[in-house]
Amino acid sequence: MTVSALVTLPAQPAPRAAVELSLSEQFDAPRVTVVRPRMENLRVERGAARPYSRPGWGTVTWLVRPAAPFPPNVPIVLRLDYAGGGERAGFIFYVGRDAAFAAGLNTAWYPEIEEGPLRPDGRVRGLRGTGTLSVTVPRGWRVHAPGKRAVERHGGTVRYRFTTRTPVFFSFGAGPYTASTVKGRVPITVYVLRRHGQTRAVAEASARIVELFSNAFGKYPFDSFALAEVPSEAAGAAGFAGASVDGMMFPSTDFLDKRVNVAYYGHEIGHQWFGNMLRVDGAAGSWMLSEGLAQYASLYAVVKLEGSAAAEEYRREGYPGYFDEGAAGYFRLAAAGLDHRLRDLPADAPESRTLSDTKGQLAWEMLARTLGRSRFHAALRQLAREHRFGRVRWDDALASIVRTAGRDLQPFYAQWFDSTELPPGQTMLQWTPRLHAMADALADVTRAESLLNRGQTKEAAELLRKIARQAPSPDPFAVAFRVHDDLAQLAFDDGDLATARTEIDAALRAPNPPPRELAPAHLLRGRIALAQGDQAAATESLHAAIAADERLGNRIGAGIQARALLDR
Ligand SMILES: [Zn+2]
């Protein structure tokens, strides 16, 4: 993609020797001109290159240095032209032939000014901006971005312009979209790449969730909300299953195919308040105030839209077709020695996400029950008012909740956030003999899956093979099923079809397969058989996937994917 950017930096009281701008490592050196004030002999120096843990996800800093410093008290206007991107995905950044999307919060696809000292881990930590975003696409494509829209057609291309006065991280979704809108105080639009049976239902559920959260957490921060579909493979390469950016989210094709997954949409819409509008300053609380609160909001959406039985299931074992979490997910991590106190979950550990999605969610739920839900929500509204579009430190956020609650919460905070010991007398997370037995039986599988989540596939495969050789008998918690299923997926990802087939057959022969895992396992066998050209086995497995998903009310989504493969 080629980018032309006109950047205005506000006046500053002191002269500046250079201006520092961050760009994703996927872009070539920018050509820079200073539009205002007039400056001579400009040098553009490549500054710190900060790689991320994945190639293509890092950030490079560029220094724009005139011969004499930029004068004080006048705004600086720079023009930058550069090209790049498109060969591989970045973090929530992808430019392909099927679709394109970019999240300014995660990848510096436009020139960003860092908010503070550069982060050594390569992540961009930019400032919000206002202004106009123009995206030119081939005819037949549509673009969505937050702000007021104008469209111009020129021959074979279409130019979309979006103007926003609300400070945002500029993001957009583009593709051969068709759109479906639910009108309301906050209009909701779903952009889809192809037909899904659920598009209208997704728009309607999103509208209800936005309204529910506006009442609970304060006015929705943007003019509209949009969902822009992204191909599942592109989402995987760009590091997400669903992502929420200012005023919009990027649901993957897989999720749009499923029966409306209220937990998923509730979580991503919850991030509009927690993680997008309200961000965290410092390492402490960075998971709990974004991920943990989004996951609390998700649970609240489930209880309000689907009732207390659905919420109870979510709390105990996770929401079907979402992630396998809930209390059981937490106990599995704890038994595998992967627990950590909530207040300062490490930035990069994959367990941090699971811990904030499980124990973190339930800790906020417990606080809501302790204070009364309406008082807890009043505290969240006050917190959002105090730090609208700003950052808050963990301790300041906790103090703000105490002020609104009007009572001492130190004992609650100490028990839930500062310790891995479970608070006595609470009812959210209780070890039962069965949970102990399950979590202990699966401890090694949990460790292997943690290695997988860290990208250590070789070590994970070795551990999985070792567990497979010593699978317990009897096997009430499906150790053998899970291990062979994971090994089948690994072999399939590697293109080793024969091993993948052997492993998936072993999984499907293993005792006590978990009902929620069965449809995806049949679907995987169907995919392997298709790749092998074994049409008969593929048809049989895809029908089995459809039947297994039907038994769970089609909530897993594998049945719909299987049907799509059968129809090809
Ligand atoms: Zn999240």
Image: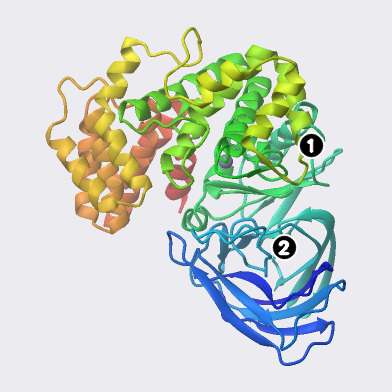
Q: Residue at x 23, y 39 (%)?
A: 484
Label placed on residue 142: 2
Which quadrant does ligand 1 occupy?
A: top right
Q: Residue at x 57, y 17 (%)?
A: 412
Query: Which residue is denoted by mark 1 in the rendering?
Result: 386
Above or below 29: residue 92: above
Colouring of the image:
rainbow
Q: Nearer the viewer, mark 1 or mark 2?
A: 1
- x, y percent for residue 485: 28, 39
> Hey, what amino acid is under mark 2?
Arg
Q: Residue at x 75, y 81 (%)?
A: 69
Mark 1 Cα within 10 Å, few/some/many (few <14, many 20+)? some
Question: Residue lying furthest top in this view?
Answer: 425
Residue contact at pointers 1 and 2, CB within 8 angstroms: no
Above or below 23: residue 463: above
Above or below 133: residue 237: above
Of residues 372 and 160, the one nearer the viewer is: 372
**Relative horizontal placement of residue 20, taking residue 383 as reference (left or right):** left
> Hey, what amino acid is under mark 1?
Glu
- x, y percent for residue 202: 67, 38
Is there any visible trace of residue 319 in the rendered image? Answer: no
Of residues 315 and 5, the one nearer the viewer is: 5
Q: Earlier in the sequence, mark 1 or mark 2?
A: 2
**Relative horizontal placement of residue 146, taking residue 399 as reference (left or right):** right
Q: Is mark 1 within 8 Å of ligand 1?
A: no
